[in-house]
Amino acid sequence: MSYQALLEHSNKMLDSVRNGDWDTLIETEVEYVREVERLSYAESGVELSDEQKLQKMTLLHTIMDQDREIRERLIERRAKLEETLLSMQKKQQLEHSYRN
């Protein structure tokens, strides 16, 4: 249970979103959230050395950059899904019009 483990989950999530593997993304995100909760509990009252703080900040910076890319790709995916749904609705409306 560490920030390194969070980074590993983040790496897996980023790979999943880049490959369009949405099921793995969701599964990994659940693991990621659990790890955040464990870290939050484990870190309470713990004093980190300056070196540990620097390492933590470096890992968090990388995780935040990856999170930004994941969110951007999810927004793109949502837009594509909305476009597909709109296209399907128009197709259904046309089919309905031709039947009547």
Image: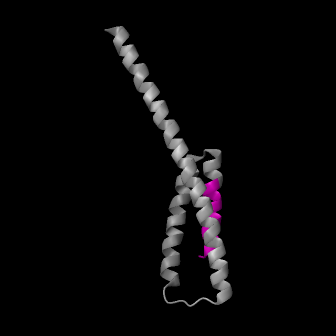
Task: Say left or right for 26 vs 93.
Answer: right
Residue 95 rendering spot, x and y as whole percentages: 39, 14
Q: Quadrant of the N terminus?
A: bottom right
Give the colouring mode of the picture: one colour
Going 65% across and 60% down the picture, which residue do you hit?
A: 11
Vertical order, 51 against 29 (above or below)? below
Residue 100 rendering spot, x and y as whole percentages: 31, 8
- The image quadrant that residue 12 belongs to is bottom right
Residue most extreme to the left: 100
Residue 59 rendering spot, x and y as whole percentages: 65, 72
Residue 46 rendering spot, x and y as whole percentages: 54, 89
Secondary structure mostly taken by the magenta-highlighted segment of the chain: helix
Vertical order, 47 against 87 (above or below)? below
Span highlighted in magenta in the image: 1-14
Task: Say left or right for 60 vs 100.
Answer: right
Residue 48 belongs to magenta span = no
Residue 3 belongs to magenta span = yes
Task: Say left or right for 100 vs 20.
Answer: left
- The image quadrant that residue 88 belongs to is top left
Going 39% across and 20% down the picture, which residue do you hit?
A: 92
In depth, the one of 28 and 99 nearer the eye is 99
Going 65% across and 46% down the picture, which residue do you hit?
A: 19
Going 63% across and 55% down the picture, which residue do you hit?
A: 14
Vertical order, 92 against 40 (above or below)? above
